[in-house]
């Protein structure tokens, strides 16, 4: 294994909602079976995502989002691409409820994922999607992510 590989941790739970929201907002553009671009919630950044399955449940990935690069977890652009590719399930109801959320603005304003999560869950409830459905969905995705080995691979940035 090259020294440019490092195992990514499971993300904060809210990143599951950011990921599915980015799909609902049509901010993900699949370039080919290994590459995608994800536009940030403000529309001011485009994240490059490369995902290569090495063997069953082992992936090498590259994404230039902050969570992946600086915090060492599977960032929401990677999760979104995994959802689009069918590696991680999509719940259409949750996707609809998470569409149109100004993630960056909320995260900067409140600086705590737990507060932001509560805001988006309350918003979803007002749209008729129960908190329980969303929490169950997050649990399913987090469990699935826990079964995968996802390595950050700097070399893939060249693709």
Image (tube, rainbow, N blue to C red):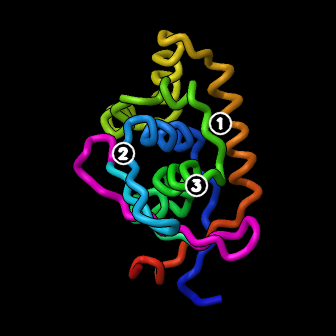
Q: Residue visible at 57% across and 30% down?
A: 92
Q: Which mark's residue is nearer the viewer, 1 or 3? A: 3
Image vertical order of residue 32 relative to residue 153, above or below = above
Say which label, 2 or 1, has the lower sequence index. 2
The boundaries of the magenta stretch are: 40-60
Can residue 14 be seen here? The reply is yes
Q: Which residue is mark 2?
A: 27
**SS at badge 2:** loop
Q: Which residue is mark 3?
A: 85
Q: CA distance from mark 2 to mark 3?
A: 15 Å
Q: Which mark's residue is nearer the viewer, 2 or 3? A: 3
Q: Position of residue 124 (x, y in %)?
A: 50, 18
The reply, left or right, for residue 51 in relation to residue 40 is: right
Magenta-colored segment: predominant secondary structure: strand
The reply, left or right, for residue 81 in relation to residue 42 is: right
Say which label, 2 or 3, has the lower sequence index. 2
Image vertical order of residue 137 relative to residue 97, above or below = below
Q: Is residue 59 magenta?
A: yes
Which label belongs to residue 45? none
Q: Position of residue 114 (x, y in %)?
A: 53, 31
Image vertical order of residue 77 relative to residue 98, above or below = below
Q: Which residue is mark 1?
A: 138
Q: Residue furthest left?
A: 44
């Amino acid at each position: 294994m090259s020294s440019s590989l490092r195992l990514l941790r499971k993300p904060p739970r809210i990143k599951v909602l950011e990921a599915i929201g980015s799909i609902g907002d049509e901010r993900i553009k699949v370039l080919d079976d290994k590459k995608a671009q994800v536009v940030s919630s403000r529309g001011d950044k485009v994240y490059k995502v490369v995902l290569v399955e090495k063997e069953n449940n082992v992936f090498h990935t590259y994404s230039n989002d902050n969570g992946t690069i600086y915090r060492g977890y599977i960032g929401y652009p990677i999760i979104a691409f995994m959802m689009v590719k069918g590696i991680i399930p999509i719940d259409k109801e949750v996707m609809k409820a998470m569409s149109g959320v100004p993630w960056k603005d909320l995260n900067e304003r409140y600086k705590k994922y737990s507060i932001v999560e509560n805001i988006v869950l309350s918003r979803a409830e007002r749209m008729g999607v129960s908190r329980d459905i969303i929490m169950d969905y997050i649990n399913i995705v987090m469990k699935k992510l826990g079964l995968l080995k996802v390595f950050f691979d700097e070399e893939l940035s060249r693709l």
